[in-house]
Amino acid sequence: MEVIPNFLKKYFWDVDFSKLDKEEHSKFIIERILGYGDKKEIKWMRKEFKLNQIKNILKASRNLPPKSANF
């Protein structure tokens, strides 16, 4: 299980943060960061996930507001 950095904890208020796995929950993590994150979180996401993976989630996600998806 790959540990998610603590500075991201505030974006996962509704789940048990200690059980989040970067690989298993990648879609959920990427959506949250895109929806609520700032530059620091976006930078971490781009370093940790492949650009194609992020793009595919952006295209398919129904959980992102249009403004966030456009960003």
Image (spheres, grey):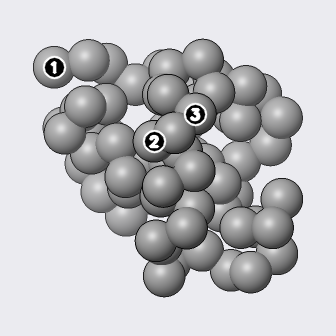
Residue 66 seen in the figure: yes
Is residue 39 depicted above or below 69 in this figure?
above
Q: Residue tagged by mark 3?
A: 51
Say which element carries label 2.
helix
Q: Residue tagged by mark 2?
A: 53
Q: Residue tagged by mark 1?
A: 1
Give whichever of discs 2 and 1 has the lower sequence position: 1
Rendered residue at 46%/71% (across/down) = 60
Q: Do the residues labelled 3 and 2 touch (CB within 8 Å)?
A: yes
For the image, the number of numbered tags is: 3
Rendered residue at 74%/80% (across/down) = 66
- The three-letter code of the residue at mark 3 reads Leu
- The three-letter code of the residue at mark 1 reads Met
- Residue 9 is labelled as none
Tell me where residue 21 appears, x and y as whole percent.
24, 33
Residue 32 seen in the figure: no
Rendered residue at 71%/67% (across/down) = 69
Say which element carries label 1.
loop
